[in-house]
């Protein structure tokens, strides 16, 4: 177990293999060696650290975000379904309707947290967290990359292209949607 | 973090941070983000981003190392290189199928492993370009040789330890650049006063110095007289055809030292490729339709039996029809027959695979077409057949230009006499005096 101390002075006992997803912490641990010294994280708040260190399995409310924390090589997880819904009884309903409902909720509720997680992930150097999951797997149709419209919504991006520019850019980049 | 507020925008993030996000995304995601606003458009099409994306493709061995000096390319040229991976060389797909023109050869590299002699096409000397584009493996009269393209030099040679035997076919997989390659080798032995014996060997070789480690030597059961052919290897798996009708594959898990045999349609060659967690089987169905199946490795778990060296080992083949399929591709027009298949990861998306199928149809005769298999992490696998260029590349045209000075006519028949690097389109073939690599525009 490793003791982490956040910017708001909360202490977290965390499994070593979980915190070692962070290259920053991994390097710190290697520098100090085996020791009980707490590791200070002055740029990460407790609420963000909870999400960053939450294991990707286990039915807790944080799993709604926690599923994004698993590493990229995991291929069997269901990226667009929060694990919490796996507990739900009505399998069929979950597959057909909850996905978009949940996506919607995620978009509106978690935008602030999304940016915090990006910044924390960057600081902690957790590559798998750097929102590739949001970009690549989040699409409601589970087909390839999210379309630009969805990314705008997710990240609060203002479309400042003129309609002509937008059409031109869409045309130029059609090849990348090709299968 | 105290300045965090709900009104924060992605464009408030430092370019370095956005670049590091791009660095772990696939190409389709970067292009998608680049279409959201001006700021992100500028960042997404920054040269450094594409240099990173193309280097990722090189690490995955999808983009070869010899065709481009990436540093010297502009962003547009790098995008062009990616698009070429999808379509094949530009001059393979003439705009108008009627105005038939030969593909333009841009570069030709010749290796000289056989001394001098007339440049007559030679089937015996099978040569294959490794995906990284730096080395050619070839069978030089029973010895496997690794040649460096850069300086026309043999790097190492491999001879089987089996007595009175020679290498005659092989396939290789690069594990990572400049280190280990895994090779599956078909070996033919001529024991004194006995029938010919065929073996399959799996060997890991250090590409730099030829240090090798033999991981498995096996005989296909009841295959004394059967020519083993068309080996493939990927990850822990290898496969080799064990009968003269080209329908029975011996599938080997060399890490577990186990195998099983799958039996396909009696009159048509079948092919196998391995991708993570699955294998892909090209086969003709009992009702005479050429199909490509995606089969989950989990569906095979009961078939495996330990590899035995006993001569009287019996086996019961698993009929391809009986293996549970996760998904099946059939050409929508059902006019095509499939003869050969090559599969690699899609350059655009994680979880997508590109299949290059050498087949024929009435319109284009011999041709190479591609389709994409998408395996989403949840949901059903899907197949996408390319339609924009009619689905067919006039691949036969690639063979109409005889390489000079040798008066060589390239075969239009099956894809097994020559090596074709599917994504780069480099054609590798052997003559009696040399190995030739032909690059196309």
Image (spheres, rainbow, N blue to C red):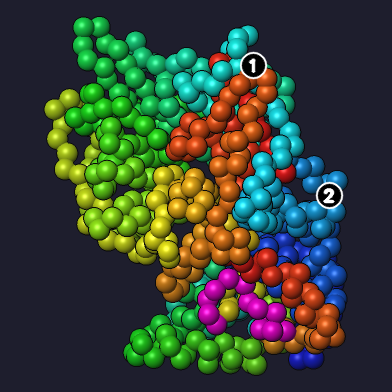
Q: Residue B199, position in %: x, y?
A: 32, 25
Q: Chain of mark 1?
A: B
Q: Residue B74, position in %: x, y?
A: 85, 54
Which residue carries the number 1 mark? B112
Give the residue drawn at x 42%, y 54%.
B336
Task: Determine the main secondary structure of the stretch shown in magenta.
Answer: loop
Give the residue drawn at x 69%, y 77%.
A117
Q: Residue furthest front?
A: B98
Secondary structure of the residue carrying numbered label 1: loop
Q: Which contiguous range is marked in magenta?
A: A140-152
Image mark for residue B65: none
Query: Is residue B221 shown above or below B176?
Result: above
Q: Chain of mark 2?
A: B
- The image quadrant of residue B28 is bottom right
Which residue carries the number 2 mark? B73
- Mark 2 and mark 1: Cα distance apart in space: 31 Å
Q: Earlier in the sequence, mark 2 or mark 1?
A: 2
Query: Is residue B434 shown above or below B177?
Result: above
Give the residue drawn at x 35%, y 36%.
B240
Q: In this view of the protein, can residue B58 be seen by the observer?
A: no
In which quadrant is the N terminus of chain A drawn?
bottom right
B219 lies left or right of B67: left
């Amino acid at each position: 177990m490793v003791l982490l101390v956040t910017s708001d002075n909360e202490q977290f006992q965390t499994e070593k293999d979980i915190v070692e997803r962070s290259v920053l912490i991994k390097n710190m641990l290697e520098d100090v060696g085996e020791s009980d010294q707490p590791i200070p994280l002055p740029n990460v708040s407790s609420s963000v650290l909870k999400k960053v260190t939450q294991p990707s399995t286990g039915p807790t409310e944080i799993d709604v975000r926690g599923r994004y924390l698993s590493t990229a090589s995991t291929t069997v997880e269901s990226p667009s379904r929060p694990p919490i819904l796996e507990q739900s009884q009505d399998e069929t309903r979950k597959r057909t309707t909850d996905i978009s409902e949940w996506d919607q909720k995620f978009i509106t509720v978690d935008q602030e947290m999304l940016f915090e997680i990006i910044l924390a992930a960057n600081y902690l150097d957790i590559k798998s967290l750097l929102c590739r999951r949001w970009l690549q797997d989040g699409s409601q149709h589970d087909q390839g990359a999210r379309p630009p419209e969805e990314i705008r919504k997710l990240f609060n991006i203002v479309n400042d292209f003129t309609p002509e520019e937008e059409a031109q850019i869409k045309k130029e980049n059609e090849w990348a949607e090709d299968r | 973090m105290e300045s965090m507020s709900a009104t924060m925008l992605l464009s408030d993030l430092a370019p370095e941070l956005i670049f590091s996000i791009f660095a772990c995304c696939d190409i389709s995601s970067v292009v998608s983000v680049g279409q959201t606003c001006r700021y992100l458009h500028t960042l997404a099409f920054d040269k450094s981003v594409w240099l990173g994306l193309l280097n990722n493709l090189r690490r995955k061995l999808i983009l070869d190392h010899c065709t481009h000096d990436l540093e010297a390319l502009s962003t547009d040229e790098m995008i062009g290189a990616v698009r070429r991976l999808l379509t094949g060389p530009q001059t393979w797909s003439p705009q108008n199928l009627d105005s038939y023109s030969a593909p333009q050869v841009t570069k030709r590299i010749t290796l000289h492993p056989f001394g001098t002699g007339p440049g007559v096409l030679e089937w015996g000397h099978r040569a294959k370009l490794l995906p990284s584009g730096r080395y050619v493996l070839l069978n030089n009269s029973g010895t496997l040789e690794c040649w460096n393209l850069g300086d026309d030099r043999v790097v190492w040679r491999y001879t089987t330890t089996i007595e009175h035997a020679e290498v005659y076919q092989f396939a290789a997989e690069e594990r990572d650049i400049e280190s280990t390659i895994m090779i599956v080798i078909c070996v033919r032995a001529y024991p004194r006063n006995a029938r010919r014996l065929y073996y399959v060997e799996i060997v890991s070789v250090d590409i730099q110095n030829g240090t090798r480690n033999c991981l498995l030597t096996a005989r296909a059961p009841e295959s004394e007289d059967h020519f083993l052919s068309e080996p493939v290897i990927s990850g822990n798996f290898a496969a080799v055809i064990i009968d003269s009708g080209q329908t029975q594959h011996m599938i080997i898990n060399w890490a577990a030292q186990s195998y099983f045999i799958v039996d396909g349609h009696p009159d048509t060659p079948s092919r196998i490729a391995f991708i993570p967690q699955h294998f892909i089987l090209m086969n003709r169905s009992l009702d005479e339709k050429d199909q490509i199946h995606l089969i989950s490795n989990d569906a095979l778990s009961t078939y495996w039996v330990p590899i035995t060296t006993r001569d009287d080992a019996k086996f019961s083949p698993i009929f391809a029809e009986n293996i549970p399929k996760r998904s099946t591709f059939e050409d929508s027009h059902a006019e095509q027959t499939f003869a050969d298949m090559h599969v690699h990861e899609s350059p655009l998306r994680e979880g997508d695979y590109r299949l290059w199928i050498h087949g024929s149809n009435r319109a284009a005769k011999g041709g190479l077409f591609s389709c994409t298999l998408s395996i989403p992490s949840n949901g059903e696998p899907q197949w996408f057949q390319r339609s924009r260029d009619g689905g067919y590349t006039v691949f036969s045209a690639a063979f109409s230009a005889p390489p000079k000075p040798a008066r060589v006519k390239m075969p239009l028949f099956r894809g097994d006499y020559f090596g074709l690097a599917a994504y780069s389109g480099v054609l590798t073939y052997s003559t009696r005096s040399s190995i030739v690599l032909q690059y196309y525009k």
